[in-house]
């Protein structure tokens, strides 16, 4: 509907021309070319030097100020080239006749990551990624030296997914830090990392991480295929990728999970899922995902099984309330008054005396004003947000009731619904439930409980039709897989969860072979 | 295809805004009726509906207005009368939450079947309300008395009957299902609990009734109305009512007393009771055996008895057995001789045990019932004496 296939190719066809152009042997020309390509951008630093024992070789170091670590450049490139060569062992004297690049690489450049560049495209990309470029007079190639080092946020505690028990660190905006955070948790050679560059203009690094041998190869292939299909000018957040590769656009349910917790990613990788990391955002995508994962928090696995199971049940109850709370209230008070105990009915009727709106309008007003409050306090600085919510509760809670616009019971229903909707660990799923709640309210107001049942059936049918990278969204409930039930509604003790989710990790499902803990032999004899 | 889907979506979204159709009713559009009273006036029915004033019943406010109001209308049928109420009531009478249905004695003597059809046909109603008969009074009077403790009189009538049936036994709770199944049964006739107003009816209708201690007027359950099919033919006293409930295996808890050998009384709290009614056939003559097994605690001792001895307890048990047997037998005899109809469901018992013989018996069952020999056997067990064993009366020196 919204696709425009003619756009994609014509635009991108211009750019390869420049990327394939080789460097010239003239240093000045090359420098000129850089300046022209980048429009004399002021953050590009070009330092021309002369190296060699007799200082007869002209060279230039180019780097982007702010992206490259200028201290390292001074220590490991400039110092080596300008001082160390001059004072070097006579065996390594630099003369213009030798393959000077090999000598520099072998003996003088004390940097870890050195790549040859011969064409303009890669040269500019690595320059703008923060590498230092070394060019020499008389050579149509240069070095790209890994000198990336910029100010980033550092690893801090996650703000969106907090836990009581468990690691507190969260991903940052830098891809390399993020991959390191995952590697620190999984030190297996089978943890593979593949990097792609996506975005014609932004050239954003996108990394795919999985554990070879656990992951199903089909899924990796599918992820690659879908990522390769992306043709876009820029990727600024993993949300761009998510929207471009997910299975179904016309669904309120997210079919890709995202998190900023390395421990969740590590756990998902161990279950045979694929992580997609995008440079510039702490949100890492996970595919494939099933519905039930959105109801499971990291903490479920760090606490004891019984606590986790109870909390999980509590979470399902909250989802139920969050989805159906106002709808049930509307349906029962406007269609099925006979279902209420007499005393309760009289009580509710007393509260509704003098309320001018139908229950549906009442609920809608309350829900909408709550959503406004929520959205407002989300965008505000924390200090102001607090006062907003106090005003909100005062205005909506007591003033509206006292003014007779709203019945007190409705305030209770909306409040419990609102609180329930925050119990879900996944914010995007909570939003989904929130959207569907309005639909259910409409159905309840039109058809009563009958409408609610129809709505729930429609939602379940829709959920059963969804897939995430080929995995049924409702598994392991539909299709029903008995072994996977131990980590679905309940969370069995750790030793009992010996297998990986069957639909995701198809070929390597044995996770552990621990035995249940035993009491020690009693040696004291009583 | 896509356009169709889009249209469908739009229709579904539009559907949300067409609320307010069908039978949607807001809570404040309902006149919640909690009690219905049916009287006969000439050939017409006079229906009274006790409707709750919700604002007065719940919450902290209120006080100046009575918690309920009574709408009355007369019509050829009950439904007509109910609908006619809309001419005086601003809201439609909502029948789902009826707690009590009061039928007047005069109506009951003429037959109640016509009044019950509406109640069982109306889809709105729940069948969990109790049906009672206003004893020697009009039914509407029963819904006019304001009550204390429970502001809504009908709810109070409901819980009073429930509590007394559980704790005291002479009353019995009958809801519509039970009444109808007894009406259609060939081996049983129904009974209903009687209701009466004690005290000054005039003051009872005003708020003064709940302002003084004790209330000048109150409602009290007393006796059981005996029906032949759907027509009331007489009343059972409280003790007879208790016997009825013993036979009906309907005793949850009750209190009775025995006379001690030396004069004075000892009351027993029945905490558990189980009745088995068995029918047997001898030469085509049915007989009935009633076995009551009762567990009771000593509740109150007003005589000199050494309760620490097992022999004494056994003696008391025997006294209680004989006393209960006596009043059950007396009641059965009274019903057999006076009313000549089977209210105990002996016919049902025979039907279940001897379905073949029942086919012959059922034609003249009520005549057979009059002469049916009934053997009553009651066994009491007294496991507990309460907080003390012997009464302190034993230690008191006079």
Image (tube, rainbow, N blue to C red):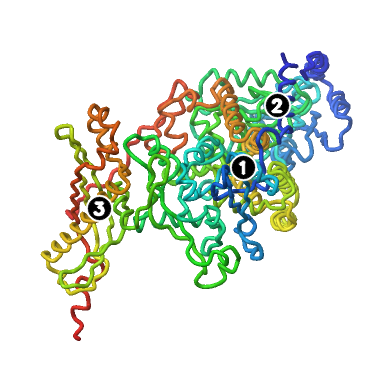
Q: Can residue B113 be seen in this view?
A: yes
**Image mark for residue B12:** 2
Q: Where is residue B330 in the image (x, y as percent from the top left)?
A: 24, 53
Snapshot quadrant of residue B303: bottom left
Whether tag 3 and tag 2 are in contact, CB under 8 A, the answer is no
Left or right: residue B361 compared with residue B76: left
Q: Where is residue B55 in the image (x, y as percent from the top left)?
A: 65, 57
Q: How far apart are marks 3 and 1 (CA)?
A: 43 Å
Left or right: residue A334 compared with residue B324: right
Using the image as rendered, state which of residue A363 and residue B175 is in the foreground.
B175
Left or right: residue B6 compared with residue A408: right
Using the image as rendered, state which of residue A39 and residue A327 is in the foreground.
A327
Question: In the picture shown, does residue B208 fall above or below A370?
Answer: below
Callouts 3 and 1 in the same chain: yes
Question: Which residue carries the number 3 mark?
Answer: B328
Question: Which residue carries the number 1 mark?
Answer: B75
Q: Can residue A168 be seen in this view?
A: no
SS type, badge 2: helix
Q: Tell which residue pokes out farthest to the left in this image.
A: B311
Q: Where is residue A219 in the image (x, y as percent from the top left)?
A: 56, 20
For mark 3, name the chain: B
Q: How far apart are marks 3 and 2 (CA)?
A: 67 Å
Earlier residue among tags 3 and 2:
2
Earlier residue among tags 3 and 1:
1
Please identify, in this view, whether the residue under mark 3 or under mark 1 is nearer the observer. 1
Label 1: few (<14), some (14–19) or many (≥20) C-alpha neighbours in 10 Å: some
Please identify, in this view, whether the residue under mark 1 or under mark 2 is nearer the observer. 1
Using the image as rendered, state which of residue A182 and residue A503 is in the foreground.
A503
Q: Where, quadrant-wise, is the C terminus of chain A in this rendering?
A: bottom left
């Amino acid at each position: 509907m919204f696709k425009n296939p003619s756009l994609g190719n014509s635009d991108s066809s211009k750019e390869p021309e420049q990327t394939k152009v080789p460097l010239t042997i003239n240093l000045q020309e090359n420098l000129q070319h850089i300046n022209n390509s980048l429009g004399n951008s002021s953050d590009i630093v070009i330092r021309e030097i002369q190296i060699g024992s007799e200082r007869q070789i002209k060279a230039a170091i180019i780097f982007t100020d702010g992206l490259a670590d200028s201290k390292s450049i001074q220590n490991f490139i400039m110092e080596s080239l300008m001082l160390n060569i001059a004072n070097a062992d006579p065996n390594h004297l630099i003369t213009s006749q030798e393959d000077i690049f090999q000598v520099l690489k072998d003996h003088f450049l004390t940097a870890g990551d050195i790549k040859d560049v011969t064409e303009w495209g890669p040269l500019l990309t690595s320059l703008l990624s923060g590498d230092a470029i070394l060019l020499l007079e008389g050579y149509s190639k240069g070095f790209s030296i890994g000198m990336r080092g910029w100010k980033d946020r550092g690893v801090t505690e996650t703000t969106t997914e907090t836990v009581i028990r468990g690691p507190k660190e969260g991903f940052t905006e830098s891809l390399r830090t993020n991959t390191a955070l995952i590697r620190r948790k999984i030190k297996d050679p089978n943890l593979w990392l593949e990097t792609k560059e996506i975005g014609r203009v932004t050239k954003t690094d996108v990394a795919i991480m999985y554990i070879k041998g656990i992951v199903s190869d089909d899924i990796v292939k599918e992820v690659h295929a879908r990522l390769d299909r992306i043709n876009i000018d820029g990727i600024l957040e993993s949300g761009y990728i998510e929207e471009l590769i997910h299975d179904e656009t016309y669904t309120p349910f997210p079919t890709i999970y995202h998190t900023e917790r390395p421990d969740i990613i590590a756990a998902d990788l161990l279950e045979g899922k694929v992580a997609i990391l995008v440079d510039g955002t702490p949100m890492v995508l996970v595919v494939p995902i099933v519905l039930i994962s959105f109801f499971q928090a990291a903490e479920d696995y760090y606490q004891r099984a019984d606590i986790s199971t109870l909390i999980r049940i509590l979470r399902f109850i909250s989802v139920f309330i969050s989805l159906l709370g106002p709808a049930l209230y509307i349906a029962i008070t406007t269609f099925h008054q006979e279902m209420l105990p007499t005393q309760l009915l009289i009580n509710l009727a007393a509260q509704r005396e003098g309320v001018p709106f139908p229950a549906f309008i009442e609920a809608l007003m309350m829900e909408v004003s709550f959503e406004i409050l929520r959205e407002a306090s989300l965008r505000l600085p924390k200090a102001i947000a607090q006062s907003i919510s106090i005003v909100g509760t005062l205005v909506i809670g007591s003033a509206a009731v006292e003014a007779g616009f709203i019945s007190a019971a409705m305030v209770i229903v909306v409040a419990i619904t609102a609180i329930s909707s925050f119990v879900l660990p996944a914010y995007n799923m909570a939003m989904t439930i929130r959207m569907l709640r309005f639909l259910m309210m409409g159905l309840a107001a039109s058809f009563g409980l009958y409408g609610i049942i129809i709505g729930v059936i429609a939602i379940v049918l829709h959920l059963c039709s969804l897939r995430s990278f080929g995995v049924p969204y409702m598994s392991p409930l539909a299709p029903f897989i008995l072994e996977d039930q131990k980590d679905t509604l309940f969370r069995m003790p750790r030793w009992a969860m010996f297998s990986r989710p069957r639909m995701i990790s198809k070929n390597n499902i044995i996770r552990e072979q621990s035995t249940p803990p035993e009491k020690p032999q009693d040696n004291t004899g009583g | 295809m896509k356009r169709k889907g889009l249209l469908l979506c739009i229709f579904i979204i539009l559907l949300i805004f067409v609320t307010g159709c069908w039978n949607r009713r807001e809570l404040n559009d309902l006149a919640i009726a909690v009690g219905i009273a049916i009287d006969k006036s000439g050939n017409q029915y006079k229906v009274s509906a006790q409707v709750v004033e919700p604002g007065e019943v719940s919450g902290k406010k209120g006080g100046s207005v009575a918690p309920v109001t009574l709408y009355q209308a007369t019509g050829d049928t009950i439904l007509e009368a109910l609908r006619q109420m809309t001419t005086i009531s601003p809201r439609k009478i909502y029948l789902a939450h009826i707690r009590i249905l009061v039928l007047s004695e005069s109506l009951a003597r003429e037959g109640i079947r016509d009044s019950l059809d509406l109640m069982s046909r109306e889809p709105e109603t729940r069948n969990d309300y109790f049906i009672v008969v206003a004893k020697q009074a009009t039914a509407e009077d029963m819904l006019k008395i304001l009550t204390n403790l429970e502001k809504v009189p009908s709810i109070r009538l409901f819980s009073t009957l429930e509590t007394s049936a559980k704790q005291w036994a002479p009353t019995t709770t009958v809801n519509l299902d039970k009444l109808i199944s007894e009406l259609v049964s060939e081996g049983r006739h129904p009974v209903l609990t009687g209701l009466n107003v004690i005290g000054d009816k005039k003051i009872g209708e005003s708020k003064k009734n709940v302002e003084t201690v004790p209330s000048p007027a109150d409602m009290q359950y007393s006796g059981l109305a005996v029906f032949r099919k759907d027509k009331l033919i007489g009343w059972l006293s409280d003790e007879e009512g208790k016997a009825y409930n013993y036979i009906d295996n309907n005793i949850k808890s009750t209190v009775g007393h025995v006379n001690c050998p030396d004069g004075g009384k000892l009351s027993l709290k029945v905490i558990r009771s189980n009745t088995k009614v068995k029918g047997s056939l001898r030469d085509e003559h049915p007989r009935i055996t009633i076995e009551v097994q009762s567990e009771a605690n000593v509740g109150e001792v007003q005589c000199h008895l050494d309760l620490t001895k097992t022999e004494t307890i056994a003696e008391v048990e025997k006294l209680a057995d004989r006393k209960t047997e006596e009043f059950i037998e007396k009641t059965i005899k009274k019903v057999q001789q006076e009313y000549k109809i089977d209210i105990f469901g002996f016919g049902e018992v025979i039907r279940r045990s001897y379905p073949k013989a029942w086919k012959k018996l059922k034609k003249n069952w009520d005549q057979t019932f009059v002469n049916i020999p009934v053997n009553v056997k009651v066994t009491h067990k007294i496991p507990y004496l309460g907080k003390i064993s012997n009464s302190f009366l034993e230690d008191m020196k006079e």
